[in-house]
Amino acid sequence: MRRLLILPLALSATLVLAACGGGEATPVTETVTSVKVSTQKVTVTESVVEEPEPEAAPEPEPEPVVAPVEAQVNTVPQGFASIPEPARAVAPAPAPAPAAAYYKNCSAARAAGAAPVYAGSPGYGTHLDRDGDGVGCE
């Protein structure tokens, strides 16, 4: 009975060791593959075969015979395209400074469409600002 128990245990231990590489090292095999590239020139020739037609039918116009066509092989090395230099940008002219405006009184400022006139804006004057708050012709 003891032998029957030990035999399966020994067998399973052997399988585990073999599966894990437990004993012998296996050699590593390297495979080197070289590839040779070749270019083939293909010539395509087309021919037209005309079948005789019955005499009763009107003759259609004959089809032109096609000459053999050779595939073109580009043997000229391709370079980079030259990029033209960008055109210089011209800056727009600066906006003209606002004309200095002077209004003799608030009636003139209103007639010009400038009332109310704020301090720092063209046409402002202390003679137009009665209360001195920075807004003339209120």
Image (tube, rainbow, N blue to C red):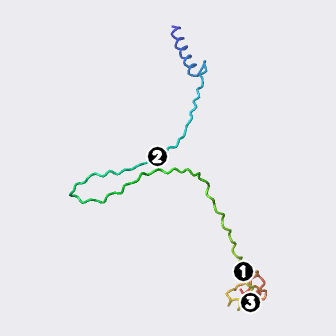
- Would you place residue 19 above or below residue 4 in this image? below
Q: Position of residue 99 (x, y in %)?
A: 73, 84
- Residue 96 numbered tag: 1
* Cα–Cα span, label 2 and label 3: 91 Å
- Residue at screen point 60% across, 23% down: 27
Q: Is there CB contact under 8 Å for labels 3 and 1?
A: no
Q: Position of residue 124 (x, y in %)?
A: 75, 85
- Residue at screen point 63% across, 60% down: 83
Please state which amino acid type lies under the numbered disc 3: Tyr
Q: Mark 2 points at which residue?
A: 42
Please state which amino acid type lies under the numbered disc 2: Val
* Cα–Cα span, label 3 and label 1: 21 Å
Instruction: Work out whether residue 56 or residue 6 is closer to the camera in this orientation and state it.
Output: 56
- Residue 103 numbered tag: 3
Instruction: Work out whether residue 17 or residue 50 is closer to the camera in this orientation and state it.
Output: 50
Q: Earlier in the sequence, mark 3 or mark 1?
A: 1
**Which is more foreground, mark 3 or mark 1?**
1
Q: Is there CB contact under 8 Å for labels 2 and 3?
A: no
**Which is more foreground, mark 2 or mark 3?**
2
Please state which amino acid type lies under the numbered disc 1: Pro
Q: Is there CB contact under 8 Å for labels 1 and 2?
A: no
Question: Residue 37 falls in which quadrant of the image?
Answer: top right
Instruction: Work out whether residue 48 or residue 99 is closer to the camera in this orientation and state it.
Output: 48
Q: Position of residue 16 (x, y in %)?
A: 56, 20
